[in-house]
Image (cartoon, helix red, strand yellow):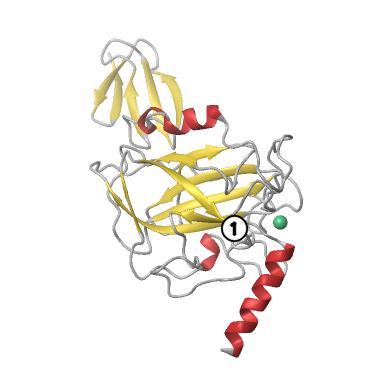
Amino acid sequence: MKFLSSLFLLASLIYSVSAHTTMSYPLPRSHIFNPNTPFKDYTCLTSPLNGGVGCLPKPFPCGGYPVDTKFSTILIAGQKFNVTFYNPAAPNPDSSTDQARHNGGLCEFALSYNGGITWTKIATYHKTCPDVLFGWTVKIPENAPTCDTLGQCLFSWSWINAAGNLEFYQNCADVKIIGKSITPLPEIDITKANLPEFEDAFFPEGDPSNTGNAKGSGPLAKDITENLKPFSTKPEPEYAPETTKCVKDKKSPYYIVYNNGKKTTLKCKGTKVCHQRHNNIVCKK
Ligand SMILES: [Cu+2]
């Protein structure tokens, strides 16, 4: 118990210096409220993966925290919900609460189906995120397939702060996803910056009307609108990565190559036209 109480003391000391927030819904790995975590991190879940005052650097992805013993959250394809944040230094926050928000920055929300090896970014908030005094609307893609293997299925919040030190924050929640589609979501990577293993150094735009601490101006309306758009219209929905499609079967020489969300339009040589063959094409007369 002596160890525990000194841990609490240490925790309160650190919070008074650096009162960042954690994601609180969905409940991330090692969150103090998470009933299914084998390890509650009272001190450093709030710190960036770079490390912080009294906190060692943590590995990407997800800070290396242990997998929950069972799913705390079930999400359904197409479901809209508000991601919320929690500041352990201020369990009952008001508009004067110091949240160490570093003028906001870039928040990205993403799903992984393979334990954080690849990501599908599903929502983005610019400038004003995070803030415990607002909900941040996210929608699980309507075409998200089921994911029910503990350790593989993740909902991630990553935050790149707009001011202060160049830092990268990430909390990951083990989430069960219930969907109907059998096609994997396309890979849409999260912004990776400010860690030794990432090449980029990046300060995203912040919001001048946000003080960095205390209550900010909340989610931008255009971000909410964008995040609620049908996911299937954002990347190239009808085509799996690396497919090729005639612009007009047997009528036009042009065809489109879809590769990792990028599309390139090419033309058959000479007088040949494009013939569709399942996910591929042939050029002939
Ligand atoms: Cu800070």
Depicted 261 relative to depicted 115: above or below:
above
Q: How many marks?
A: 1
Q: Is residue 280 left or right of residue 122?
A: left
Depth check: 42 or 226 in front? Answer: 42
- Using a 10 Å C-alpha cutoff, classify the residue at mark 1 as few (fewer than 14 neighbours), some (14 to 19) or many (20 or more): many
**The C terminus - image quarter:** top left
Q: Quadrant of ligand 1?
A: bottom right
| Residue 175, quarter of the rendered image | bottom left
**The N terminus - image quarter:** bottom right
| Residue 139, quarter of the rendered image | top left
The percent position of residue 120, horizontal first and vertical second, equals: 44, 44
Q: Secondary structure at mark 1?
A: loop
Q: Is residue 282 left or right of residue 34?
A: left
Identify residue for label 1: 87
Q: Amino acid at mark 1?
A: Asn
| Residue 153, quarter of the rendered image | bottom left
The percent position of residue 188, horizontal first and vertical second, equals: 47, 41
Residue 54 at least partly seen: no
Depth check: 49 or 227 in front? Answer: 227
- Which residue lies at the image location 60% right of the left edge and 49% below the top edge? 159
